[in-house]
Amino acid sequence: MENIVVSLSFRFQDISSSGSNSVHSMQVCTEPKVILSTDDIVSLIGNKCDGVIGQLTEDWGDTLFGALKKAGGHAYSNMAVGYNNVDVDAATRHGISVGNTPGVLTETTAELAAALTLAAARRVVEADDFMRAGKYEGWLPTLFVGNLLKGQTVGIIGAGRIGTAYARMMVEGFKMNVIYYDLYQATRLEKFVSAYGQFLESQGETPVHWRRASSPEDVLKEADVVSLHPVLDKTTYHLINKERLALMKKDAVLVNASRGPVVDETALVEHLKANPMFRVGLDVFEDEPYMKPGLGELSNAVVVPHIASASKWTREGMATLAAQNVAAKLKGWPVWSSPNVEPFLDEIKPAPKAAPSIINAKALCLSSMP
């Protein structure tokens, strides 16, 4: 019998089905709580659990992986592409595979970052509140004047898949120039901007260009819009702090759809208060689900509740990949060797008999598909 715990916030129930050779039981946590404590999850794991599908709001460390191992568990998957909430070393010590869900969030997250950029630059939320409050009495030349994006410079800190997708949207949509900082050269982004610049020039328009910065500070000083897309680790915790905010243009737009602690939120609140033309769009927060005091009252901040991946296709895809990571490990299937996970999301063809993405596959000596 295989028993899988799914720690998603729904009311608790048991779903069982029997096959010819085995019985599979899935326990779905549906408590009213949105965020489960360690004790809650330990209770759900109980004394028999083969695998868990969890969320990024849970801190998976030695306690939880120890409980899962004690219950006979072998597999865990985060329903997220990031896994800063997971102690992968602890999981490996307990012989538990750790899965994540890459490849389905890229465009959806980039689109939300672009939406936050537009909303902040053009003061959409402020204007919406103004209109709903019945304050609009007629057109004025100074009413909610914002920032023009066309021809400006967009800065990317973290030019991986999501950062690159966002940059392309801003280049194609608004003919923005690009400055980016990343530890690795974003060759695909550079080639795209160069090719698009040549196309614009061939049409008699001003070409766009790119520049790779040598430091985050260079991006912050030069860009009119800065979008954050780094991973969260010790080097990026409070990457945006009081000193670096001071480097930015007084009317710049800052967007964060990566991880909340990348930004020192207390410092950001003070910067927004002191610089009313500076604007920010946030999808993530340092102490989720809470905002730092004062942030919610600032009209130059657009804040949304961690919805970057909230398209129907993406959320269904995340759930599918997370479930496949756990099921494949329990069935002894190999790890998918390609970064392209679309075969797992095909609604017509059967999914490959493999785990889409196992972070510690090498450490656990798991086999990969040829």
Image (cartoon, rainbow, N blue to C red):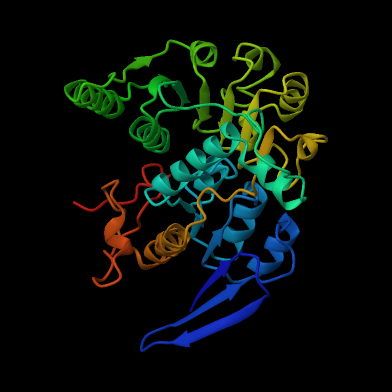
User: Above or below — where is 361 with respect to 71?
Assistant: above
Of residue 64 and residue 226, the one placed in the foreground of this image is 226
Residue at 70% x, 48% y: name it: 131
How far across and how far down the image is residue 168, in percent?
A: 35, 33
Of residue 12 and residue 204, the one placed in the foreground of this image is 204
How far across and how far down the image is residue 125, in percent?
A: 65, 43
> Is residue 257 visible to the viewer in this orientation of the structure?
no
User: Above or below — where is 150 with respect to 58?
Assistant: above
User: Above or below — where is 72 with respect to 86?
Assistant: below
How far across and how far down the image is residue 30, in percent?
A: 66, 71
Of residue 2 and residue 127, the one placed in the foreground of this image is 127
> Is residue 56 visible to the viewer in this orientation of the structure?
yes
Residue at 47% x, 27% y: name it: 149
On screen, residue 4 versus residue 294, left or right, reads left
On screen, residue 291 versus residue 346, left or right, reads right
How far across and how far down the image is residue 200, in percent?
A: 23, 25
Of residue 325 and residue 75, the one placed in the foreground of this image is 325
User: Above or below — where is 84 with respect to 254?
Assistant: below
Q: Count of labels shown?
A: 0
Residue extending farthest front: 138
